[in-house]
């Protein structure tokens, strides 16, 4: 006898659990019913003649959800704002400044008497104002650096270091001093000043713009040579922010060289030659990034020189025992700050070794 839930004739053969078991996996829940495209008419609706048993339901509206729609709108607004700000931003792009041509002045200083000389180089320095000067690049000291309103500590240090590098390459490099290569100086300049630099060496002119001796120190190799590689140096470096995009560095250094006649041996007398260089550099942000400088002003006093000699292309020093007519009524001391002369001056006795 079958169980109360089974049909009298029993379950179908070969199908465990009967026919219901086959459809137990199909669940007609509420969402399934609502999603059906066909809907059965009610009994009242089917009373009418020729009325079909079912009707087709209108398709469900599958638009974006409210949250998705809000997200799309926000993205569109943000994208439009970015485009607008990119086209019409309130900040002005900094206008690039073109470097000014270098303005240079080279003042020869003529000795008032015979140029002192000695075979003892150390003794010669010991009797001169350069006795306490440092040697070489050690004499170009960097001041304590402080950030400015628009430039960081590291940017100020970069400006000072670049100015020092320029002084070292243009005043202390033996190859440059003997009239040789000038590339080591050239690569430290802003690219927009290179045409002026090249013209100065190709066609030297005493026009205050194209004198090689305004860019660097170099002697006539046919007249003089270094007797001692230990060049004495003393001076200062200062920085100032001129505007939000420019740093300026001013340098004021005195260099003292021991020279002897070109081609002479060590028994020849040595004399001292003094060069006072006042340089004014400017750096924009590209210059700082590229480790380059704009050289704006170069003021040079050099002696002993003869006023009649052209100091535009090379310096032709008066050596030990030589004399020249003084260029002015008063002596100019290149070791004293704040002094200035025009065209040619006389080298003060206080600037010479006292032997």
Image (spheres, helix red, strand yellow):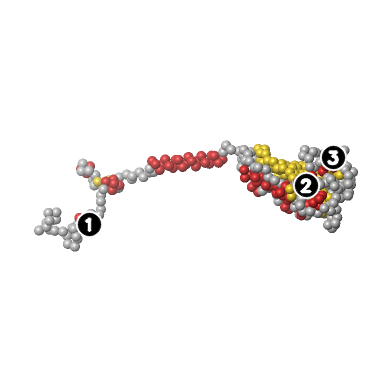
Q: How many marks?
A: 3
Q: Residue furthest bottom?
A: 14
Which of the two labelled residues, at mark 3 and mark 1, occupies the earlier sequence position? 1
The N terminus sits in image quarter: bottom left
Mark pair 3, 2: CA separation: 21 Å
Residue shown at the point (44%, 40%) measured from the top left: 73
Q: Quick one: 123 or 34, which is closer to the camera?
A: 123
Read off the residue under disc 2. Answer: 131
Q: Position of residue 238 (x, y in %)?
A: 69, 41
Residue shown at the point (86%, 47%) measured from the top left: 115
Task: Label 1, secondary structure: give it.
Answer: helix
Task: Label 3, secondary structure: give it.
Answer: strand
Task: State the mark number for residue 331.
Answer: 3
Q: Which mark lies nearer to you, 2 or 1?
A: 2
Task: State the mark number for residue 22.
Answer: 1
Which of the two labelled residues, at mark 2 and mark 1, occupies the earlier sequence position? 1
Q: Position of residue 80 (x, y in %)?
A: 50, 40
């Amino acid at each position: 006898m079958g169980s109360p839930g089974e049909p009298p004739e029993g379950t179908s053969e070969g199908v465990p659990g009967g026919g219901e078991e086959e459809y137990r996996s199909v669940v007609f829940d509420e969402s399934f019913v609502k999603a059906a495209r066909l809907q059965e008419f009610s009994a009242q609706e089917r009373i009418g003649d020729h009325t079909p048993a079912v009707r087709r339901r209108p398709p469900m509206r599958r638009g974006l959800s409210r949250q998705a729609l809000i997200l799309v709108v926000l993205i569109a607004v943000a994208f439009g704002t970015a485009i607008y700000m990119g086209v019409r931003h309130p900040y002005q792009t900094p206008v690039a400044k073109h470097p000014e041509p270098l303005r240079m002045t080279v003042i020869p200083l003529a000795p008032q008497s015979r140029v002192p000389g000695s075979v003892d180089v150390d003794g010669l320095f010991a009797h001169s104002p350069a006795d306490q000067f440092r040697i070489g690049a050690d004499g170009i000291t960097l001041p304590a650096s402080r950030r400015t309103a628009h430039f960081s500590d590291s940017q100020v240090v970069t400006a000072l270091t670049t100015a020092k590098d320029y002084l070292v390459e243009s005043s202390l490099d033996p190859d440059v001093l003997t009239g040789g290569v000038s590339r080591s100086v050239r690569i430290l300049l802003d690219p927009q000043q290179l045409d002026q630099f090249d013209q100065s060496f190709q066609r030297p002119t005493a026009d205050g713009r194209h004198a090689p001796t305004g860019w660097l120190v170099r002697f006539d190799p046919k007249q003089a040579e270094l007797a001692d590689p230990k060049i004495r140096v003393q001076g200062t470096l200062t920085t100032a922010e001129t505007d939000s995009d420019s740093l300026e560095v001013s340098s004021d250094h005195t260099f003292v060289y021991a020279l002897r006649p070109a081609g002479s041996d060590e028994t020849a007398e040595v004399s001292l030659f003094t060069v006072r260089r006042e340089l004014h550099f400017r750096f924009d942000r590209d210059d700082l990034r590229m480790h380059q400088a704009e050289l704006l002003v170069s003021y040079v006093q050099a002696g002993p020189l003869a006023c009649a000699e052209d100091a535009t292309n090379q310096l032709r020093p008066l050596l030990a025992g030589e004399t020249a007519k003084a260029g002015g009524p008063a002596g100019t001391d290149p070791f004293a700050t704040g002094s200035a002369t025009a065209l040619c001056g006389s080298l003060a006795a206080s600037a010479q070794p006292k032997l």
